[in-house]
Amino acid sequence: YKERLPMLKRSIFFVLFFFIICTSVNVFAVPVAYRSWTYLDLTALLSPEWSWTLLSSHSYEFDRNNDPKGNVEKKTFFYEVFTGPTYTMKFGNLTVKLPLWYYYQGFPIRSAVNPSDHDKYYYSHNIEFMPTLEYKIGNFKFWNRVIFHNKVYSSLYDSSSKNKGYSLLIREYFRVEYNVTDQFAVMIGDEIFQGIIEDDDTKDITPSPLSPGFEYGGFTQNRLYIGFSYKCTPTIIITPMYMYQTQYFDAGNELTEKDHYLFTTLTFIFKTY
C-alpha cells in the first residue's frame, strides 16, 4: 500500500490542478447550482453472460446563484428509472457490456421557481443502448461507455402529435480507475453530450436550456467526475463522486450554466445462478 502512495498523491494533485483550471473561467458569468444526485442500482446476475438491472435516481437542488431569472432553488427537479437486460462478453482483460434499457425521466417543476405559474410535472419515455468497454492493466481499469439516448415521447408539448417523436443524443463517458486496495478504488472521468438527431416537429418550440422536451442538436453538456468506490462486501458497493457539469445551450456553444453535484451510487448485486 505504501508503494502506491506517491502515485496516488501525484494523481490527486493532477486532478485538483485540472479542476481549478476548468472551474476558474467565467465562474461569475453564468448561473451556478449546487445539487445532489443519488442512484440506487439493483442488479440481478442471471447467468455469466446475462443480467437485469433496475436503476432509479433522485436529483435535488439546494442552492442557485447568479441566475437572471431568479435564484430560487429548484429542490426536487428530476427523477429517473432505468430497467433492462445487459449482455456481457469477456476476452482476457477486456470486458464488453451491451445494455439495452427502457428509461423514464420525470421533471417536477415547482411554482416557486416561476411564481406566475403552478406546479407541473412532465415526463418522457426513452430507449437506451449503452455499449461499454472495460480494460484492466495491473491496478488500472480504463472504462468507456457510449450512450445512444433515443427519446420517443415527451409530455412537454400541448398536442399528442408533438408528444410522440424522435431525437437522438449520444453521450460518451471515459473514465480511469485505480485500485488502491481490493476494496477501494479512486477514479476520474469525463463525459460529453452531443445531439445527433433533433425532432422535426418540435425543434423550433423546445425551450432551452435543459427541458423535458426532445433533445437539442450539437454539443450541449460536459461532465467531469472525481471520486472513489468502496466495496462494503463483494455485492454491496458505494460510489461517491463530485460531478462538475457545464451546459452549452446558446448559439456558438457558449457556456450557459455551471452545476456542482454530490453524485452517489449505491449498488446491490444479486447472484441467481
Image (cartoon, rainbow, N blue to C red):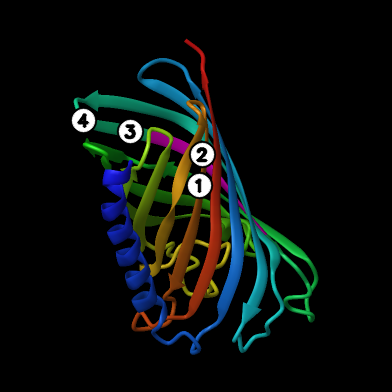
* Pointer 4 or 2: first along the chain: 4
Image x and y of residue 62, in percent = 68, 68
Question: Which residue lies under the disc numbered 4?
Answer: 93
Identified at 42% across, 50% down, the residue is: 149
Quadrant of the image containing the N terminus = top left
Image x and y of residue 237, in percent = 51, 36
Kindly report which numbered mark, 4 or 2, lies closer to the viewer in this rendering: 4
Question: Which residue lies under the disc numbered 2?
Answer: 102
Identified at 74% across, 78% down, the residue is: 114
Residue type of the residue flagged with mark 4: Asn
Question: Do we see residue 143 in this rendering?
Answer: no
Identified at 39% across, 43% down, the residue is: 185
Question: Which residue lies under the disc numbered 1?
Answer: 126
Work out whether residue 270 or residue 7 is closer to the camera in this orientation and state it: 7
Residue 57 badge? none
Question: Which residue lies under the disc numbered 3?
Answer: 97
Kindly report which numbered mark, 4 or 1, lies closer to the viewer in this rendering: 4
Badge 1 element:
strand
The answer for how far apart the CA atoms under marks 2 and 3 are is 16 Å
Badge 3 element:
strand
* Pointer 1 or 3: first along the chain: 3
Badge 2 element:
strand
Crowding at label 1, few (<14), some or many (≥20) Cα neighbours within 10 Å?
A: some
